[in-house]
Amino acid sequence: ISTCYLIHTNTLCHRETMKVVQPIAPFLSWCSSQGIQSPLDVKARENGSRYVVLKDQVETIDGKVNLVRCPDKATIAASSIPELADRLLFEKNLGEKSEFAPYIAVLPEECVGMPRFWDFAKLNEVADGGALLQAVKEDQARVSDFKDPWALSIADSRANFLPDQSYSLTPLLDMINHDSSVKTSAEIVNNELFLNVAAESIPQQSGIFNMFQPQPELFISYGDFTNLQTLIQYGFCADENPFNAESFKISVLGQGSITATVFNNGIIDPIAMSTLRQTLATTDELEDVSEGSLMVPFLSTRNEMEVYALVAGYLEEAIYESKIGSVTDDAIVASYLKGRVASLQAGSDMIRKKYPDLF
């Protein structure tokens, strides 16, 4: 038995409006013919986005429910993301001759929700201190070097990472949307991938399963990602993300700027705080600090108050900037910035509770 990590999976590509909504029935029939077993049914919203629901009663084993069981022959696999994109493009170019044609037919035609496809003006207007723009720039060389943007975006956003260090596109699994609260696991047994979720994630079923009653959407977790990571990788942001973290810049006179990160629980990263303590310390306060120390704890009440006052001021500026920027008709940008404000506000609230006199 090998553990399979869901580092990449489904994306906002499914939550985007596709130019053509392909019928899902031929794909589901193909899945069955390939030996893919699942109690899931795929539904489509009016805008073309897809989601999954239960179509059958499920069995709980050791507190888990299996959602997808897929033999490796039914996946497109490769040793790297670029190679996976190449394989996908090869199969796509085969057209109906490809054994994966029914799967490729239901893939989104474009993934415009991914920031790599946004123009510079839009990226530059996102009020996050330049974090999104910088992340896109850092990935631009890899993206621009690949011959087919569509194939790379599909591979980036929908592949899952296997225990042998390879990647695969797994039909049906990649149509399940993300919820970070869902306990998700996967394993490979006898060349079959088993995707499981905690039984508590499945809506309670009582009596005989009624397929004619509306069923709630089911989710899996793609991993403990920040909103910036999910936006770059998948093209979406969760409304509530307990794993979010946001960065902001703090300017110190004569010292340039320091980048600090605030986590969703309000904690500000200790390395930035340590740097600020040293930067704002007096000569006397630094007497007991070893030269080259990376982590500097509490030095004095005076120093701590000055550090937190400086941090609080720049936090409030970042909150204000992102609040203004979140008032936009662009739903993705609005969601991203609202999540940023929530995390930054958690940091501000933590300081306010610790040092109320600073406000």
Image: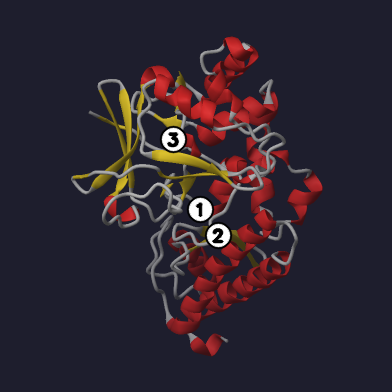
Question: Looking at the image, which residue sits at the far right?
Answer: 121
Residue situated in front as seen by the camera: 94 or 186: 94
287 over 156 or under it: above or below: below
The residue shown at (62%, 25%) is: 151
Q: Secondary structure at mark 3?
A: helix
Residue wearing tag 1: 226
Residue situated in front as seen by the camera: 234 or 56: 56
| First of labels 2, 3 by sequence position | 3
The amino acid type of the residue labelled 3 equals: Leu
- The reply, left or right, for residue 243 in relation to residue 254 is left
Mark 1 packing: few (<14 Cα in 10 Å), some, or many (20+)?
many
Residue wearing tag 2: 246
Please indicate, yes or no, whether residue 186 appears anywhere in the rendered image: yes
The amino acid type of the residue labelled 1 equals: Thr
**Rendered-image quadrant of the C terminus:** bottom right
The disc label shown at residue 173, or none? 3
In the rendered image, residue 53, in percent from the top left (x then y), is placed at 44, 46
Mark 3 packing: few (<14 Cα in 10 Å), some, or many (20+)?
many
- The reply, left or right, for residue 10 in relation to residue 293 is right
Disc 1 to disc 3: CB gap under 8 Å: no
Q: Secondary structure at mark 1?
A: loop
| First of labels 2, 1 by sequence position | 1
- The reply, left or right, for residue 124 in relation to residue 39 is right
| First of labels 1, 3 by sequence position | 3
The residue shown at (55%, 33%) is: 24
In the rendered image, residue 109, in percent from the top left (x then y), is placed at 67, 31
- The reply, left or right, for residue 251 in relation to residue 290 is right
Disc 2 to disc 1: CB gap under 8 Å: yes
Alpha carbons under labels 2 and 3: distance apart: 30 Å
Please indicate, yes or no, whether residue 129 appears anywhere in the rendered image: no
The residue shown at (55%, 22%) is: 102
The amino acid type of the residue labelled 2 equals: Glu
